[in-house]
Image (cartoon, coloured by chain):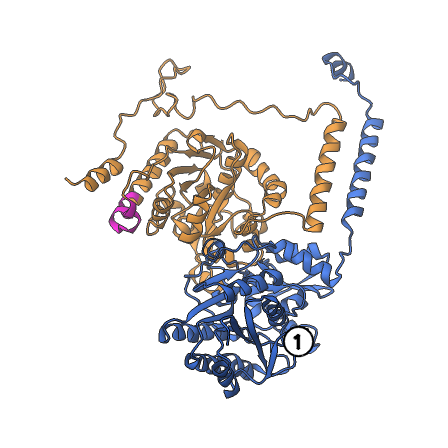
Amino acid sequence: MGERERRLAEVIAIDRTVRQRCAQSLPTGGSCRNWAGPSGRCRIHETAQPAAPDPVDDDGPVDPARLEQLVAGVLSFLRRRVTGDYDVDVFGFDRDLTEQVILPLARPLYGSYFRVRTTGLQHVPDEGGALLVANHAGALPLDAIMTKVALLDEHPAHRNLRELAADLALRLPVVGALARKTGNTVAHDDDAVRLLSGGELVGVWPEGFKGIGKPYSQRYKLARFGRGGYVRVALRAGTPIIPVAIIGSEETYPIVGNVRWLARLLDLPYFPITWQFPLLGPLGVLPLPSRWLIEFGEPIEVTDLPNDAADDPMLVLELSDRVRDTVQHMLYRNLMGRRSVFL
Amino acid sequence: MSDGWRVLITGIAGGLAARLARRLSAHEGVDLVVGVDSRLPSHDVAGTRLVRADMASPVVGEVLERDGIDTLVHLDITATPGDIGQRSRKEHNVIGTMQLLAAAQRAPRLRTVILKSTTAVYGSDAGNRSMFAEDVTTHADSGYAKDVVEAEGYARVLARRREGIVVTVLRFANLLGSGIDTPFGRYLALPVIPTVLGYDPRLQLCHTDDAVEVLYQACLDTRAGIYNVAGSGVLYLSQAARIAGRPTVPVPLPLVDVIARLVRRSRMVDVPTDQLRYLSYGRVADISRLRTLFGYEPAYSSRATLEAFLSEEGITPLVDEARLRALERRAVSVVRRLATDEHPRPAVDTPEARHGRA
């Protein structure tokens, strides 16, 4: 067995360690039989991070100093926008707009509506590039937005996620411009490598439209991970791949049908019929309030692979399969620990 | 004949060419600067010998040979020939370049050819990578950009056919600055800036000072190859409009063509239709080759280029930033007063005080 094959086998070897079960004793007398997570407890019994105390006390009037700070912040933001006094990077990421306007709009959805919980954030490095690879679902890319909020708000280093988007999304008026301004860029090898080499956190949803537009009956079953282009990117940039499993996105817009002719007419990859759309009319655009969990998995290092690994299609595909298996594994594990979709 | 540089510049009537000619004439190592154009120069070109002829005419070939020209700077590729129609623009740019470079191939002492190109050769599309390096295949499909792609092709052929000739292709981003009149500059100087509704292109600008300097260095040093030339950083069009303090009018995509035609007829700005894609998606070129291989660091960023252009043109924003800042301070102090007056709170927020209030 040559050096290359041996390394390949090492990398591709799927985690075979025996999984422990959660040993939490239950009120019924027995102990919990759910699979245990890295903490030795299952999802339910893992002590949730205590929520940060709300800085605004609701019983009294607003603290004048806080109010003043708030007003000053808003006014200075408005002044910067009116005079064009802000910077965007070459990809078009407008940090000021993202952190001051878009994120505050997404936070209620994140905190109160989907009640997103995150685990494994310690696997995301505080600095330097890493490629986050996640499952895609739910007709609209809410999963990308929630992952962005999670990394900016809950990661200790408050990292901005840079997503790779389909050119079709970037071509749409308003949506495309907004996507670029919030840090998306086109899913092109050059862009991804440039971002990763620049030490950015890059997010990719390799299932693409096949994943996000799949019917509800196929929920949490990963579609093909494209042609593994993201692996090539990680190899070229020499950055780790972090598998990410997102639970809850499938139930936001359960897709029961696809109007192909309408999709073709509108030049869209799919035109979904969901439980609530178009049955409920305008209300149908509201996602169902599923409870979400985002798990960041252990990084898969690619630096020990040979230099020309990116040009080896077999190796790229095998690594891609491994990442896909890992994400699928994480999905099933988390689904087993889930009590209810909405509660 | 001494050993100094002998330079021929086409398109001497343009502002950029005039500035390059003056810069070269001032250099003591330059023996001769010849300027060729069918139009009369409107700028000061002291020290330049003018040849009033079309670059495609045999006169240019004679000059190249008789005067022992060693450096040819081809700047006479135009995006907007004014009153001339589409066909004659192509005639001028493509056929003109072909004839000029054919004459150059026969010039015995020629060793450097510099071609002014544009980053427009990369095209504009949502599916494009965010930054273009020089080795990216060009896919301009219409208008001026296509002319330039063809001109670059002729330059490549020349480099292949004649050994010892160094061809430098400089792809400039949108040029702005003193002494140069560009469609894009006129567009930014409009009292109200029309934009494409729902789109906000990333702009990359190049200051004419940097452009002249890069052309100058390319003349005096051997810099074979293709280089993108632009300021560092990018601006959004909306941001550029805010910096200029100009209101924007978003025009829905189906109406853009009609509006562009109206604007063109009003003779304020000639908006070529191939610019409309640029105004939707923008374009950014990678200038790392300019920095490392060419060895030039642009003095102006894209933003500084715009600001310099605005102050030269005397464009002042409708809203003054200093006044905005003053207003902001006043508003904050009003809030402070209101908040402290209406809800007097003890200086130290003790649990007792909190309890008493509740």
Question: Camera-side residue: A8 or A40?
Answer: A8
Residue A275 appears at what percent x and percent y?
A: 48, 47
Residue situated furthest left in the rendering: A1
Q: Name the residue under label 1.
A: B264
Instruction: Count every numbered label the image shows and give the total.
Output: 1
> Quadrant of the image for the N terminus of chain A?
top left
The quadrant in which residue A74 appears is: top right
The chain drawn orange is chain what?
A
Residue A127 appears at what percent x and percent y?
A: 47, 35
Residue B345 appears at what percent x and percent y?
A: 80, 21
Q: In this view, does A342 lie to the left or right of B311?
A: left
Question: Going 41% across and 41% down the picture, which residue do you hit?
Answer: A131
The quadrant in which residue B195 appears is: bottom right
Q: In this view, does A170 lie to the left or right of A319?
A: right
Question: Going 69% across and 24% down the picture, which residue do you hit?
Answer: A57
Question: Camera-side residue: B177 or B137?
Answer: B177
Q: Is residue B123 visible?
A: no
